[in-house]
Amino acid sequence: MDDIQPRYREATEEPIVDTAHVLAAIAAATARDGQVDSGLFRRAFQRVRAQPIEARIYSFLKTNVDIRVYITDAAGIVIYDSDSGRDEGVNYSEWNDVHHTLRGHYGARTSPSRADPKTKVLYVASPIVLDGEIIGVLSVGKSATNSNRFVESARRDLMLGGAAVCVVLIIAGVILGQWLTRPIRRLTDYALAIRDGRRAELPRLPPGELRDLGAAFEQMRTALEGKRYVENYVQTLTHEIKSPLSAIRGAAELLGEDLPTDQRRQFIDNISSESERITHIAETLMLLTSLESSGAVKSTGPIALDRIALDAAASLGILIERRDLTIDDSGIEPVTVYGDGVLIRQAIVNLLQNAVEFSPPQTVISICTRIIDDTVVFEVRDHGPGIPDYAESKIYDRFFSLTRPDSGKKSSGLGLSLVKEIMTLHEGSVVVASHPEGGTLATLVFLHG
C-alpha cells in the first residue's frame, strides 16, 4: 500500500513530461522575433475552459481541465500564467523546474497548492528552444487531487482484495488443516478404542509415516488383544470349570463308598451333567474364539430368515414340550438376509433357548420376522421375570449368567456373548431387554439387502 502513491505519481509525471515538451515545441514554432507568443496560449486556454468536458474514467467523472501552464523568458520571468495571469511578471528563476531547465537539465518540482496547502501540485518544465538557444521555459503543473482519488480507490480496492484473500486463505487453511488432521484424529480415536478395549478397525490413512504408524498401532493392538485375550480366558475358564470339576470330584469320591442304588444313580447323573457343562463351555469358547479371530463372516449368501427361525424353534421342540410351553409363530413373515446361515441359526437358537429356560410353564413364546424401514428384524418374546436392573449392562459379558427360575442353576454365560459376536460380524445388532408388559424381548437387527 505504501508503494501505490509513488507509482501513481510516476504514472502522472510521465505524460506531463510529454505535454510540456509538445507545448514547448508549439511555443517555439510560434515565436516571433525570439519572443514567445503568449497570446496564442491565452486564447487557447480560454477556449479550453469554455468547452465543456465530461469524461468517464472508470468510476471517476472528469469535468474540467486541471493543469496549469506558465511560460517564462530566458531570465525566468513569468510572461504567461494560465491561472488567470496570476503570477505574470514574477521571477521564477529559483524554482527547481525553471532553474534546472534553463541550465539544460530536467526540471521538475512538487509544491503545495495555493487553494489547498494539503494538496500537492507536480510541475514539469521543458525548454523553449529556438535556433539552438533557450529562449524560455514552459512548465506544466498537475494537481494531485485526482491522482489522490485514484490512490485512495486503489488502496480501498487493495484492502478489500487483501481482506478477501485473507478470508480465502483462512478458509483454505481450515480446510487444509482439517484434511491434514483428520487422519491423525482417526488414528487417535483408534488408539483410544484400543485403550478402552472397544472393537475398532484401522482407519484408512494416507501413504507415508501415518500409514506406517497405523500399521504399528494395529500390530500393537493384535499383540495386546492376544495377550489380554489369553489372560482373560484362562482366568474366566478356570473360574467357570472350577465349580463343575469340584462337583465331579465330590461325586466320584462318594461313588467310592457303599451307597444305595438311587444315590449312586444321582451322583452318576451329576457327573454326566457337569461333564456336559464343561464340554459345552469348551465348544462355545472355541466357536467364540474362532469368530473373534476371523473378524469376518467366511460364508455369505441370501438366507431365508423366516425358515431358519422356524427350524430353530422346531429343534427345541422336545424341550418346549417338556416345559409345557407354546410357540406362537404367527408373526413370521418371509424375509431374506445375507450372511452365514449356520451362525445366524446358532444366534436364534441361543435366544430361543434363553426364552424357554426363563418362561413359566403354560406360557407362550412369540417369535416374528419382519421388515422395519431398511432393516430386517427377528424378535422373540417370553413371559418370564425379565432382566433385573443390575444385569442390564452385564448380560453380554462372557460367563455372566442369571439363575434359572426352575432349577436355580446358571448357564455357561456364553450364549449372549456368542450372539453379539455373530451379529457384529454381520454388521447387525442384538438387543435384549425387559418388555414393558412383562417378560423379555430379544431382537436381532440385520441390514436389509
Image (cartoon, grey):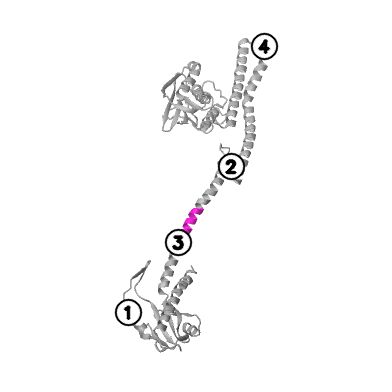
Amino acid under disc 3: Gly
The answer to whether residue 283 is above or below residue 38 is above
Work out whether mark 1 precedes mark 2 in sequence or the reverse, and give the earlier one.
1
Mark 1 lies on residue: 47
| Residue type, numbered disc 2 | Ala
421 or 147, which lies in front?
147
- The answer to whether any part of residue 439 appears in the image is no
Mark 4 and mark 1 lie on one chain; the one further toward the N terminus is: 1
Q: Residue furthest top?
A: 261
Query: How much space separates mark 2 and mark 4, taking CA atoms?
Result: 62 Å
Report, in whole angstroms, how far the alpha carbon at label 4 lies from the one at label 3. 105 Å
* Residue denoted by label 3: 161
| Mark positioned earlier in the residue sequence (2 or 4) | 2
Location of residue 25 with respect to 399 vertically, above or below:
below
- Cα gap from disc 2 to disc 3, whole angstroms: 44 Å
**Callout 4 secondary element:** loop
Q: Which mark is residue 258?
A: 4
> Which residue range is magenta in the image?
163-173
Residue neighbourhood size for the residue with mark 3, other residues' Cα within 10 Å, grouped as few (<14), some (14–19), many (≥20): few
Q: Nearer the viewer, mark 2 or mark 3?
A: 3
Circle on res. 82 = none
SS label for mark 2? helix
Pointer 2: what residue? Answer: 191
Q: Earlier in the sequence, mark 3 or mark 1?
A: 1
In this rendered view, identify the residue nearer to me: 302 or 294.
302
